[in-house]
Image (tube, helix red, strand yellow):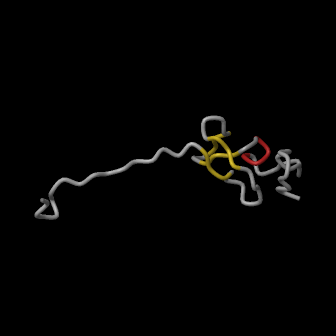
Amino acid sequence: MLSGKNDFKETMMATVTQMKCACASCLCVVDVSQAVQKDGQYYCSDACANGHPDGAGCGHAGCNCHR
């Protein structure tokens, strides 16, 4: 029986393997092991990571980012 707030605590840790692209207008979910990393953020493409300098979207099917 646990009797105090300092008794055994079980902590669960989760590892994130996928997340939404950090580009605000992008809908892509990217695998963090394959993502383009820039400034601590994860992006689905160089276009998103670099702020769409030429005005093109990421090019992934179903995503209309930066249009």
Q: Nearer the viewer, residue 46 or 54?
A: 46
Image quadrant in which the N terminus is located? bottom left
The answer to whether 31 appears left or right of 61 in the picture is left
Task: Single out the residue that lies furthest toward the front.
Answer: 1
Task: Single out the residue that lies furthest toward the top.
Answer: 34
Q: Nearer the viewer, residue 65 or 13?
A: 13
Query: Residue 31's spot in the image, x, y percent?
Result: 64, 41
Q: Residue at x 89, y 59 (%)?
A: 67
Task: Single out the residue that lies furthest toward the bottom.
Answer: 4
Q: Residue at x 88, y 49 (%)?
A: 56
Query: Residue 12's spot in the image, x, y percent?
Result: 36, 50
Number of on-image labels: 0
The answer to whether 61 appears left or right of 45 in the picture is right
Up the image or down, 20 lies above or below 37; here it is below
Query: Residue 58's spot in the image, x, y percent?
Result: 82, 46
Residue 6, quarter of picture = bottom left
Q: Nearer the viewer, residue 56 or 1?
A: 1
Up the image or down, 44 lies above or below 66; here it is above
Q: Nearer the viewer, residue 59 or 16?
A: 16
Q: Residue at x 60, y 35 (%)?
A: 33
Query: Residue 62's spot in the image, x, y percent?
Result: 85, 52
Q: Residue at x 66, y 35 (%)?
A: 34
